[in-house]
Image (tube, rainbow, N blue to C red):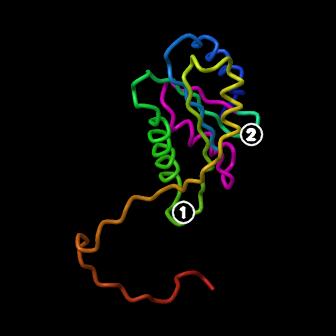
Amino acid sequence: MEPMLPLKPQLIRQVQLLSNSLTRLSLMSVVIPNLSRQATVAAVLAAVTSTDLVGMLEDGSIGVFSLRAPSADHGGGPDERFLPRLQAALGNAFSPGFGSNVKIWFRSVHRWASELSDGEELVDALFAASSRVVGIGMQPVPPATLLPFRRPRPVGPAAWPQ
């Protein structure tokens, strides 16, 4: 896997190009402390869309820069779309027992391109935003009435060599 490039130079250039438009900009950062950087990058890359820019931020987190039309989702959509895809990518990579220990530290900011004087302002807003911790989020278990009845199997001695 190629190393992640810094996101800030790309972000500054994009904000400058879009400064007079009615484009909504979103900047998100992801840190997963109990995973390697390579595994975190792979999960983020699996969760982004083809129009998102991904790179390393100055604090060591993985940044995702997203553009969208003014009325596409009324300001809240990128988080609600990105996080479930990231959780699904992580959920597919780990067994249920280990996956419950994986926590995602996530920050996001959303601004109109015309509000920003430069890309530094968007990065500063992200670093000032508070983080939220999100788990992988397993699929909900259906109610017991919908599950077929199964007799429990007797538990025998462990099959591991002594």
Q: Position of residue 22 (x, y in %)?
A: 49, 16
Q: How many marks?
A: 2
Corner quadrant of residue 99: bottom right
Residue plotted at (23% across, 74% down): 145
Residue type marked 1? Ser
Gap in angstroms between the C-alphas marked 1 and 2:
24 Å
Where residue 70 appears, x then y in whole percent? Answer: 44, 22
Asked whether, in this view, residue 111 is left or right of residue 144, the answer is right
Q: Check the image and report above or below for 14 versus 84.
A: above
Which mark sits nearer the N-terminus, 1 or 2?
2
Q: Residue furthest front?
A: 115
Q: Decide whether residue 39 is among the magenta residues.
A: yes
Which residue, given by chain and number where applicable, does mark 1 sit on? 100
Q: Position of residue 143 (x, y in %)?
A: 29, 70
**Which span is picked out in magenta?**
31-56
Residue 91 as seen in the image, left or right of residue 6: left
Q: Residue at x 44, y 59 (%)?
A: 138
Is 108 magenta? The answer is no
Q: Which amino acid does the dot numbered 2 rest on?
A: Gly
Numbered circle sitting on residue 60: 2
Report x, y in % for residue 123: 69, 30
